[in-house]
């Protein structure tokens, strides 16, 4: 059974005439007759009684007609839905963002995208950089937004923003009043850090390694799974930490934390997409808005 055969069946049923249906469908009479015959043969039923030179729906045909119309209506609705989606009037876009981006960089951009495309539902998940990359790799999200380095040849990566990490301590910590902090000094105090796999952790470790110090030598007192938990622990005196300047802004402004004099490099924010998976119109529009 095909949609084309259903359309022909309905056209003939509504007109009780093969020639009139063929004219309405812009088909030949033989094409219409052959389609009806194929439909009946495929399911071993008779849908019409042949009366003289015309056709009349029989009891089976009358019972089948509303079902055929319902299928055609659903097909038309599906086609309209795809047309809407291709024109960005409807749709859903799954985005997976790392914590820093999701909490501080992304919200106003989501608002702007929603204002431009109100019919697109944005489904945003939050985790760390590794989790975001895995979500895009496995198809759970079409778009990933991360601040850490990602080694995944299957993913395209476009820079969409940046921020900078700051080394943070309590105001009564000795580093708070230092004019300069060397890389060798970093192992002299306990640390509170994000979990392995986070962009924040990987950026800090890369910077320390570039300065000639093995990050494995840092005395890590606590490993915590969110920026907020790290901030709270550092404010409570658990140790030094490194977080985005955006994340730490309120704590520094309120005097709960101080910035230690150890410069960390700027890190790019990257938009990830799978190179081979289907790319939706909504995803393309979102990418254009972010870049």
Image: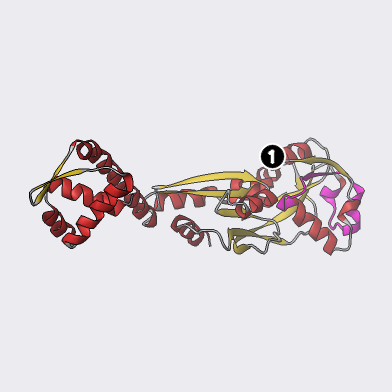
Q: What range is drawn magenta here?
A: 175-200
Q: For residue 226: magenta?
A: no
Camera-side residue: 36 or 274?
36
Describe residue 79's horizontal placement relative to residue 49 as left or right: right
Q: Please state which of residues 232 and 95 is positioned toward the viewer in this rendering.
A: 95
Quarter of the view holding residue 228:
top right
Give the residue at x 72% y 54%: 165
Secondary structure of the residue carrying tag 1 is helix
**Foreground residue, 249 or 83?**
83
Q: Quadrant of residue 25?
A: bottom left
Coordinates of residue 214 in the picture (x, y in percent): 89, 57
Residue sticking out furthest to the left: 52
**Residue at the image point whose x is 45% and y is 55% from the top:** 282
Look at the image and say whether residue 189 sits in the magenta stretch.
Answer: yes
The image position of residue 204, as x and y in percent, is 78, 55
Residue 17 point in image, percent of width and height: 11, 51
How far across and down, in percent of the image, does residue 117 sit? 40, 52
Q: Is residue 262 visible?
A: no
Across the whole image, how many numbered discs are drawn on residues? 1
The residue lying toward the viewer, choosing from 112 and 272, is 272
Q: Residues within 10 Å of mark 1 (few under 14, many from 20)?
A: few
Where 265 falls versus 90 (above or below)?
below
When asked about the image quadrant of residue 220, the answer is: top right
Q: Which residue is mark 1?
A: 228
Seen in the image, is 217 located left or right of residue 1?
Answer: right
Q: Tell me, yes or no, if residue 199 can be seen here.
A: yes
């Amino acid at each position: 059974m095909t949609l084309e055969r259903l359309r022909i069946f309905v056209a003939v049923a509504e007109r009780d005439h093969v020639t009139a249906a063929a004219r309405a469908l812009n088909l030949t009479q033989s094409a219409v007759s052959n389609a009806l015959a194929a439909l009946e043969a495929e399911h071993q039923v008779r849908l019409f009684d042949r009366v003289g030179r015309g056709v009349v729906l029989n009891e089976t045909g009358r019972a089948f007609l509303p079902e055929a119309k319902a299928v055609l209506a659903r097909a038309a609705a599906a086609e309209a839905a795809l047309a809407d989606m291709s024109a960005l009037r409807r749709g859903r876009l799954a985005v997976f963002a790392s914590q820093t981006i999701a909490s501080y960089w992304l919200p106003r951009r989501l608002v702007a995208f929603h204002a431009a495309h109100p019919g697109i539902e944005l489904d945003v998940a939050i985790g760390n950089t590794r989790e975001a990359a895995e979500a895009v790799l496995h198809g759970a999200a079409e778009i990933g937004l991360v601040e850490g380095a990602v080694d995944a040849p299957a993913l395209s990566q476009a820079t969409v923003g940046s921020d900078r990490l700051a080394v943070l301590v309590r105001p009564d910590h000795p580093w708070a009043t230092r004019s300069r902090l060397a890389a060798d000094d970093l192992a002299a105090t306990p640390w509170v850090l994000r979990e392995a796999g986070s962009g924040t952790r990987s950026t800090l470790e890369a910077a320390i390694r570039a300065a000639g110090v093995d990050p494995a030598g840092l005395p890590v007192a606590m490993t915590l799974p969110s920026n907020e938990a790290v901030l709270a622990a550092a404010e409570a005196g658990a140790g030094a930490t490194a977080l985005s300047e955006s994340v730490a802004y309120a704590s520094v402004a309120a005097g709960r934390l101080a910035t230690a004099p150890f410069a960390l490099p700027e890190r790019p924010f990257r938009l990830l997409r799978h190179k081979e998976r289907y790319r939706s119109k909504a995803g393309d529009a979102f990418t254009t808005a972010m870049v």
